[in-house]
Amino acid sequence: MGSKINQYDDTTDSFVSGFVTTAEVDRWINQSFEDIYKWYALANKGRFSSTATTDTAANQAVYTLGGDAADLLAIESVFVYLTATDTDYTRAYPLDPSDYFLSGSEKVPEGAPKFIERQIYNTDTNHYELAIEFPEDCIPTATITDGIKIMYIERPPLMSADTDVPEKLPRELHKLLVLGASIPALEKMGEFETASYLEGKLSNAIKSFYLQEQSTTSKGVKIIRPTRRDINKFYFRNS
């Protein structure tokens, strides 16, 4: 990090606090960690998902995700009981708020329940909380115990010591944390062109890794489809 913003001491091999402070770097590194962890975990849902439930309330549209889901970072999927006698959950499909309010509908299965992600300000804690809101035609009509179930990604523990490592992230992604943290540091220094370049580089790296993580079979085995010419090169090179 220090070497990218010219605040690095070669003799001690360490970051030098200056115009950009150590406290700022610590905060930006953790913010970058959460952002990268979020998309990586969503690309590997089976290994990162946790479950939480809450009761539905008749004619209530908004449900904040506190309680068991207080450590929530991202929503993976939402399921609901449509009636009090249901024994199986029905999946609810996410809507993009702007698209919904513009067109009134989304490309989801006809008649399926839907939800919108919201950020709700909690006046008791003075923090924003992630919430789900059901649009008008999907608002629960009955009070049902554990009527809503969510699969979600837990927020990773923050790093505070120099020896801390970003938990559950593969080593090849660690360098992206520094890349992400360098962007606000460079913006503070007025190096907006370099910051924009790094932002594009980070975005492309994330897309590349995300596509790799998505190329899996149902058993979690990577699918690789090289051309016949490339396969031949591989075997010839190793024969």
Image (cartoon, helix red, strand yellow):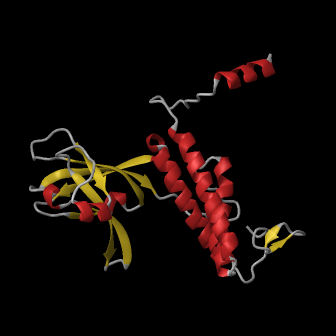
Question: Could you say where residue 133 lies in the image, as x and y percent from the top left?
Answer: 24, 62
Would you say 58 lies left or right of 227 here?
left
Pick out the residue farthest to the right.
11
Answer with the quarter of the image where residue 229 lies: top right
| Residue 83 in the figure: left or right of residue 156 | left
When asked about the image quadrant of residue 222, the answer is: top right
Front position in the image: 119 or 66 = 119
User: Is 72 displayed left or right of 146 in the figure?
Assistant: right
Viewed as shown, does residue 159 lie left or right of 7? left
Residue 154 vs residue 229, the one in the foreground: 229
Residue 151: percent from the left, percent from the top? 35, 49
Q: Nearer the viewer, residue 215 or 64?
A: 215
Quadrant including the N terminus? bottom right
Q: How many numbered circles does the render carry? A: 0
Q: Is residue 131 visible?
A: no
Q: Residue at x 72, y 19 (%)?
A: 232
> Can see residue 88?
yes
The quadrant the C terminus occupies is: top right
- Identify the residue at the far bottom of this view: 19
Which residue lies at the image location 59% right of the left edge and 50% below the top edge?
Answer: 169
Residue for point 9% across, 55% down: 142
Percent x, y for residue 37?
54, 55
**Residue 114, horizontal then vertical, whole percent:** 23, 53
Residue 79, above or below 8: above
x 32%, y 75%: residue: 122
